[in-house]
Image (cartoon, helix red, strand yellow):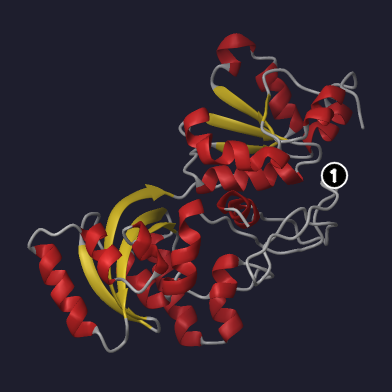
């Protein structure tokens, strides 16, 4: 499996309604392999909350900072990590951490050593304090696979990693280093940056119609993303939308932050609103600040706003 295909399987987590839906398009099983594509016109069968991971997060978080089944969300529903482990102390810790840092994500790098190697980590800490590069020390001493990337875990959200790791990271200031201990061993972590957590907004077809009819000045405030397939766009399309088909995800995803403006309002469209929600989740995970999913997709737009748009 190529890195790109791994990304494809991992990022497409999305929140769905409580009502059971039909046919999931792609998900990751416990082995990390992407399930085959199914009918992408139909919503998925799986209910619950699926959450995206930043592309760089997966390996390090899986091995060093949290629970495999929770972080990869391979078959989870809306249960939390703490609920599945039935540990009220863990649940309480996660609640406190989430309350303290619920409005932000952190960019973190770390060095992990074994449970009996705290003295070695203290020596590494002293070397870094004297001026050594954190990333180089991570490559040399960390037991976590993230060491190959200078210890970079990526962006983490509250409640997504080990409770002790969460508590340490979200209590730290940007630029600071601190130690913590988890069931994996001893960590030296460094907070590199922080950013606010963005939520996906839902846009009705009527609201989209107003934007499309607002003229050049109005449409210039937005960027328009259509994640359907090329043949679908040939059947029915709306002005201003550019094609980013999910079948070509491996091609456009790695460069999406260069292709699109992460600070600009981004409207995401598909046939029924399911694939667009998947893509919207991915865009949010990559730092896009204003993402709107068109509810019901172009099918609902045709029914409610413009009957001249072909149905299929």
- In the image, farthest residue toward the left: 130
Q: Position of residue 102 (x, y in %)?
A: 43, 59
Question: Total of numbered circles in the picture?
Answer: 1
Instruction: In this rendered view, identify the residue nearer to me: 103 or 297.
Output: 297
Q: Residue at x 52, y 29 (%)?
A: 259
Instruction: In this rendered view, identify the residue nearer to me: 247 or 94.
Output: 247
**Relative side of 223 to 133, left or right:** right
Residue 264 visible from this viewpoint: no
Q: Position of residue 286 (x, y in %)?
A: 49, 45
Q: Position of residue 24 (x, y in %)?
A: 78, 56
Residue 211 versus residue 132 in the image, above or below:
above
Q: Circle 1 is placed at which residue position?
A: 41
**Where is residue 218, by image quadrant?**
top right
Label 1: state its secondary structure.
loop
Q: Residue at x 69, y 70 (%)?
A: 75
Q: Position of residue 171 (x, y in %)?
A: 29, 66
Q: Residue at x 42, y 73 (%)?
A: 64
Q: Residue at x 81, y 40 (%)?
A: 272
């Amino acid at each position: 499996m190529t890195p790109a295909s791994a990304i494809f399987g991992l990022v497409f987590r999305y929140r769905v309604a409580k009502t059971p839906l039909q046919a999931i398009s792609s998900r990751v099983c416990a082995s990390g392999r992407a399930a085959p594509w199914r009918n992408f016109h139909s919503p998925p069968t799986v209910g619950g909350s699926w959450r995206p991971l930043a592309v760089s997060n997966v390996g390090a978080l899986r091995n060093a900072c949290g629970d495999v089944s929770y972080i990869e969300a391979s078959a989870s529903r809306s249960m939390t990590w703490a609920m599945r482990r039935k540990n009220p102390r863990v649940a309480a810790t996660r609640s406190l951490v989430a309350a303290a840092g619920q409005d932000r994500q952190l960019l973190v790098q770390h060095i992990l050593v074994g449970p009996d190697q705290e003295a070695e980590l203290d020596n590494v800490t002293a070397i870094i304090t004297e001026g050594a590069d954190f990333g180089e020390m991570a490559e040399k001493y960390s037991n976590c696979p993230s060491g190959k990337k200078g210890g970079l875990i990526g962006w983490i959200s509250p409640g997504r990693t080990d409770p002790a790791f969460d508590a340490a990271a979200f209590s730290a200031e940007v630029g600071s280093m601190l130690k913590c201990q988890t069931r994996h061993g001893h960590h030296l972590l460094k907070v590199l940056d922080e950013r606010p957590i963005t939520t996906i907004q839902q846009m009705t077809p009527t609201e989209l119609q107003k934007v499309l009819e607002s003229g050049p000045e109005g449409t210039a405030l937005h960027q328009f993303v259509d994640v359907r397939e090329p043949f679908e766009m040939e059947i029915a399309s709306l002005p201003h939308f550019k094609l980013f088909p999910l079948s070509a995800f491996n091609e456009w995803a790695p460069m999406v932050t260069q292709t699109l403006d992460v600070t600009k309002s981004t409207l995401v469209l598909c046939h029924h609103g399911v694939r667009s929600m998947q893509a919207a989740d991915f865009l949010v995970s990559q730092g896009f600040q204003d993402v709107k999913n068109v509810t019901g997709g172009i099918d609902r737009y045709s029914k409610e706003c413009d009957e001249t748009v072909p149905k299929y």
